[in-house]
Structure formats: structure tokens, C-alpha cells
Amino acid sequence: MVKKKTPRLPRGVFVTFEGIDGSGKTTQAKLLYEALKEESRSVVLLREPGGTPVAEQIRSILLEERSEPLSPRAEILLFLASRAQLVEQAVIPALQAKKIVILERFIDSTTAYQAYGRGFSPQWVEKLNRWSACEIQPDLTIELRVPVKVGLDRKKEDLPDRIEKEGKAFEEKVFKGYLKIAKRHRRIRIMDGTPPPAEVAKGVRKLVDDYLKKVEK
């Protein structure tokens, strides 16, 4: 049996996963990464905040509980700092090497959580997002959409981080923010995140495969 040759991409492809807490981003990003690796694709899996040693240190400041409360302004600036480090040190080099970059959370998370959740101007936040991301945009964004109650129920067994402790009212604002964001960007594809992970993964894979076919033409 002749092994099917893995197509070579003419350029890097940038895929991001978005959604409220408990929507299944971590699971689906990992499943997609593993599936592409099995096909001998050149792919990297990253997360935000985090993804590099410096960015991971910033992540711990953002998500761990501390005696000193973190102000909303400091919070958004730390997210932007983490992103700038991740993009320059990991994302851009991988894309330049024609790899598929899978990133759990990116600019849309900052708009949803810090603009719609915290109350900052969405237009102002999106300008900061573009600057911190060196003006790069995802090729494909998969938003895993689940009701807020479903997301909260899924996270009950996990030890919540600082932001996850904000509660239902905050998550409702974030959810509504994602609805508005999705209407403004054609790169965003909505995927129902409520079915079992394996079923969701099939839908995710179809979205990614369809996009890769366009790039490989």
C-alpha cells in the first residue's frame, strides 16, 4: 500500500480556538493537533496567555490568586504583553516556516473578556489587539459555542483560576461579546460545542480540511 504523501503548504496557516470558559477549546485544539501530527503535518500547538517561557510567567500572574488584587487596566496590559511575546517568539517564526499554528485563545478573547466583560471600549481594545499581535490575523477562527450554564457546569470539577471565579454574570457578558465579535469577522466559524468531544472534533476537522484545501490549490 502506497502511503499518501502529505501536501506541502505554500505558506503557514494560523488557526485559533475561541469560546467561553468550559466550551472545550483545550480539548479540541489538542485533538486537532494530534490528528494533523498523525498525518505528518508540520504543526505547533500553543496557548494564550502563555506559549513561551516569558509568556508563561505572565500567565501565572494573570490567572493565579494573589493577595494584591489585579486592576482591570493591569490585566489587559498583561494579556497584551503575553501576546506580544508569544507572537514574536513563536507564532511568526512558525508561520514563516510554513507550519500550521493552532492557538488556544487569541485577540477575540481579549475583546470578549476585557472589552465586553470588563467594560473597556471594544474599538480601543481591538486597536491594542492588532498592535500586540504585530498586525497578524488568524486565517481561521473556530468559536466553540455553548450556553453559559453548560460551560460553568463543565468547569465545576476543575480548580477555577482567577478569571473563572468571576461567575455567571461576567460569563454572560463575555458570551454576548462573542456573539457580536462573530458578526464582524468572516474568518470566524461557529461550532456547536455541546455534543461529545469526538463529534465536535469531526466538525472541527472538516472546517480545517476545507480551509487547507483552498491553501493547497
Image: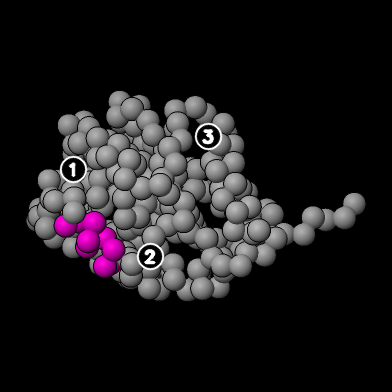
User: Would residue 209 appear left or right of 63 to someone viewing this image?
Assistant: right
As drawn, the label of residue 28 is: none
Q: Where residue 137 sits: x, y (%)?
A: 39, 60
As drawn, the label of residue 200 is: 3
Q: Is residue 207 above or below residue 45?
A: above
Local packing at callout 2 (Cα closer than 10 Å; few below 14, some 14-19, many 20+) is some
SS at badge 1: helix
Local packing at callout 3 (Cα closer than 10 Å; few below 14, some 14-19, many 20+) is some
Q: In this orientation, which residue lies closer to the viewer: 170 or 208?
A: 208
Q: Which residues are magenta?
A: 124-132
Give the CA separation, mark 2 to mark 3. Answer: 27 Å
SS at badge 3: helix
Which residue corresponds to mark 2? 136
Give the CA separation, mark 3 to mark 1. Answer: 27 Å
Residue in the picture at 55% in, 36% down: 203
Which residue corresponds to mark 1? 117
Residue in the picture at 38% in, 73% down: 88
Q: Is residue 161 above or below residue 91?
A: above
